[in-house]
Amino acid sequence: MSDLQPTSPSMRRQPKQKRSQQRVERILDAAAEVFDEVGFEAATTHAIATRADTAIGSLYQFFPDKMTIFHALELRHRERVYAAWAKFNKPEIIQQPFEGFVSAMAAVYKELLQDQTCRIVFMQYFTSPAIFQNIDESFTQEAIDFMAKLLQQRNRALIPEQCQLLAEVCVHACNTLALVALRSPESHRQKLFEQIQVLLFAYLRPHIGDEIGNEVSPPQVMKVMKSIKCPHCDSSAVSKNGHRHGKQRYICKECGKQFPESYSR
């Protein structure tokens, strides 16, 4: 699928020949660069045409104004997000060990936001959502639904409502941290992106960690939760959390503390 599909209905004419398609691609690349450097409000079609090394008349053949150009960037962003999801939505990635799964998910997310078009559209949405034509809250819901399906595939014991809640927290938390990161200096930006991965590790491990596995049936999970209680808060909402020194460890979903099997009741 090319970057121009689906095409923007507000374009003056759709590029059909390869040469015209390449020219439109250059204009969109240039627009992303100009928006990134000076912001959407300060950007002009003349600056975009100059950056694209094309005549302003050639730009106006396809785009009547910079708003139309931005709407085309929205479509490009959507397409690249869908491509990233398709790359990640594979059994060999979803069913890999927990750390690899989360690391891959965080890497795909970070790589997506390093793309200039996606970064500009992502940041602009939280600044001026009213100018958007092709992206709204339903796109965020698509992301939540996609992640909920991944979590369900990782742990069949999770009910759909749990998957949706976990996915909702993850998507909104990651988007918030990513927005702060993209507005920060490069050195601090990298640290924040690393913390996104740390957050996902800690939050998702009790629900889809390797200790749970798809082979664990709901009755078995309930048996573990009923027979083991947290020595810190006496809660029975606990799950397995790996082994250390040959002993099974658990994590409490209420207080978040970990403890070894020998301390359990």
Image: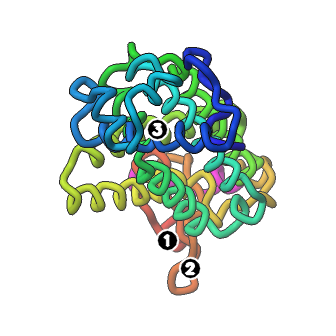
Q: In whole angstroms, how far apart are the C-alphas of marks 1 and 2?
A: 7 Å
**For the residue labelled by badge 1, is the local secondary structure a helix, a strand or a loop?**
strand
The amino acid at mark 1 is Pro
* Rendered image quadrant of residue 128: top left
In the image, residue 104 sits, relative to residue 65, either above or below, namely below
The amino acid at mark 3 is Leu
Q: Which mark is residue 247?
A: 2
Contact between labelled residues 2 and 1, with CB atoms less than 8 Å apart: yes
Residue range of the region highlighted in magenta in the rendering = 223-234
Position of 120 compared to 242: left or right? left
Residue 43 in the image, given as x and y percentages of width and height: 26, 29
Residue 258 in the image, given as x and y percentages of width and height: 44, 63
**3 vs 1, front mark:** 3
Q: Is residue 252 visible?
A: no
**2 vs 3, front mark:** 3
Q: Earlier in the sequence, mark 2 or mark 3?
A: 3
- Crowding near the residue tagged with mark 1, few <14, some 14–19, many ≥20 C-alpha atoms within 10 Å: many
Q: Residue at x 18, y 54 (%)?
A: 185
In the image, residue 121 sits, relative to residue 209, either above or below, namely above
Q: In whole angstroms, how far apart are the C-alphas of marks 3 and 1?
A: 56 Å
Q: Nearer the viewer, residue 128 or 104?
A: 128
Is residue 126 on the magenta stretch? no
Q: Residue at x 70, y 33 (%)?
A: 16
Residue corresponding to mark 1: 260
